[in-house]
Amino acid sequence: MAWTSYPVPRFQGAIRAPGDKSCSHRALMFAGLADGTSEISGLLEGEDVINTAKAMAALGASVEQIGPGKWTVKGVGKAGLSSPAQDIDFGNSGTGSRLMMGLMAGYPITARLVGDASLSKRPMNRVIKPLEQMGARFEHDGRGMLPITLHGSDALTPIDFEPEQASAQVKSCVLLAGLNARGTTSVTESRPTRDHTEKMLRGFGVKISTRPAGGVRQCVSIEGGQTLQPVDTSIPGDPSSAAFLIAGALISPSGGVVVEGVMSNETRDGFFQAAAMMGAGLGAEEMGDAAGERLVDLQAATASLKGRSIPETLVASMIDEFPVLSVIAAFAEGETVVSGAEELRVKESDRIAATVAMLRVNGVEVEERADGFVVQGCGGPPPGGGLVETHHDHRIAMSALVMGTAAQKPVSIDDPGMIATSYPDFMAHMAELGADIREG
C-alpha cells in the first residue's frame, strides 16, 4: 500500500534523536561478549537492532529488555559463544550480519546466517575473504551471499589487512575476529571510516590503537586474547536519522527544527558539512557525551541552497545520507555533483540507481554515473507528483517522504514497511514537526 507525503507550509519543532543504530548494534554485541552484566539505555529498538539482540541471545548471552530503550545483557565472558540451535536471521541488516560474522569467527562454533530478500543480495565476500585468511570456514552458493554457514575457530591467525573498499563494516568485522586471534590484527584503511567500533571497544576495556599510515590512510590494530569488561552505557542520538529532519527544515517554506542529543563524530558528519557548503545555516550546541561520543543539539532553518561538487573526502562520512542529500540538491540552485561513491551500489539497494529514479519520477533532471550522480537543482520546489519505488531501502523511502513535504505536488512511496528497520518513530516524528503523510 502506497503512502503519500503532501506539501505543508511549515516544518518546525524539537525532536529527541533516536538512538544511533551503529552504536546500538555494537553495544549489544560487546555486552554479549563481556565478562559480567551490562546495562544499556537509549537503545534503538528498530528491527535491525532487535535482530542483533536475538542473535546474541541465540549465541549464549542473556539479553533482556527492562524498559523503553533500556536493556540488560549478561555476557558469555570466558565461556565464549556457543553454536545456535537454529538459523540466525539478520533481516535487513548488513551491519548486524557482517559484524557478527567477525564476532563469531573466533569461536569453535557453527552457525547458519540468513536474511531477507534485500540482505540476501548484498555482497559478503568482502568479509568472508579476510576471515578465511584468518582460519574461519564458510559454506555458501559460491557468490558469497546469504544464506551462509560459518565454522569458527579458537585458533585464528592474525592478519594485516587492507580492504578494497573504505568500509567500517569490513574494518570492524576483521577487528572483532582479531579479538580472539593469536597475535595482533591490523586493518589499514585508504581513508578513515566511522570509528564506533574502536571507541566502544575501548569503553569495554579493550586496548586498540590507531595510527597514521601515510596521507589520509590510517592503521587500526588490536591484540588478541583480551576480555571485555561489562559497562553501563547510553546510546547517543543517530546523525543519520537526524539528517532527514534537518533536510525537512532546510527545504521547507518556513522551517525551524532542533534535533536533540545527536552524536557529533567527524566520521559521521559528512551530510552536515555538505549541507553547510550548499548554504545551510546549521547550529550545534554542546550537550555532553554518551558511550564515548560527543552530543550536540542541532538546529536548522529554511535555507536558500546552492548546488556544489561534494568532496570525495566526505563520502565515507555520509555514505548513508546521499539519498537525502539528493533531495536538498533538487531544491538547490545549480548543479550538485556526487562522485567516488560507488559503495552506494551495494547498500540495501543500488542506491545510486534508486536515488536517480526517485528524483526523475518527481521531475528532477539528474545524470547517473558509475560512482555517483549529478543533480540539476530546480532553484526551489521540484515538481513532485511521482510514485517512488523504494527497492526495500529505508533511506530511499524516508528521503522521498521528506521531499514530499515541500515539493510542488505530493510524493508517494510504494512501501514504508522497511523504515522500521532503522527509524521506527520516523512517521510520528515527521507528524510532530508538521508533515502530512497518509496511507493510500
Image (cartoon, rainbow, N blue to C red):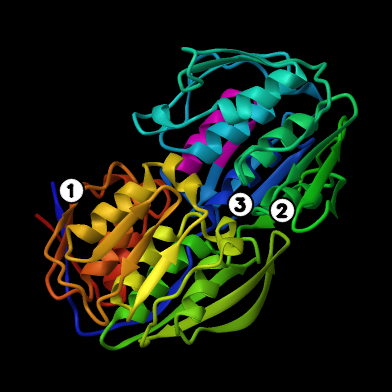
Verify CB contact (< 8 Å) between mark 2 and mark 3: no
SS type, badge 1: loop
Q: Which residues are magenta?
A: 48-64
Instruction: Tell me how far mark 1 sits from mark 2, CA to CA.
Output: 41 Å
Disc nearer the start of the sequence (1/2): 2
Q: Which residue is mark 2?
A: 232
Dot 2 alpha-carbon crowd within 10 angstroms: few under 14, some 14 to 19, many 20 or more: some
Disc nearer the start of the sequence (3/1): 3
From this view, report whether residue 316 is shown above or below residue 328.
above
Residue 387 drawn at (x, y percent): 14, 55
Disc nearer the start of the sequence (2/3): 3
Dot 3 alpha-carbon crowd within 10 angstroms: few under 14, some 14 to 19, many 20 or more: many
Q: Residue at x 31, y 79 (%)?
A: 251
Q: Looking at numbered disc 1 in the image, what kind of residue is underneath it?
A: Asp
Residue 68 drawn at (x, y percent): 48, 54
Dot 1 alpha-carbon crowd within 10 angstroms: few under 14, some 14 to 19, many 20 or more: some
Instruction: Tell me how far mark 3 sits from mark 1, CA to CA.
Output: 30 Å
- Tell me, for residue 414, which label it has, or none: 1
On the question of residue 426 being in view, the answer is yes
Q: Which residue is mark 3?
A: 23
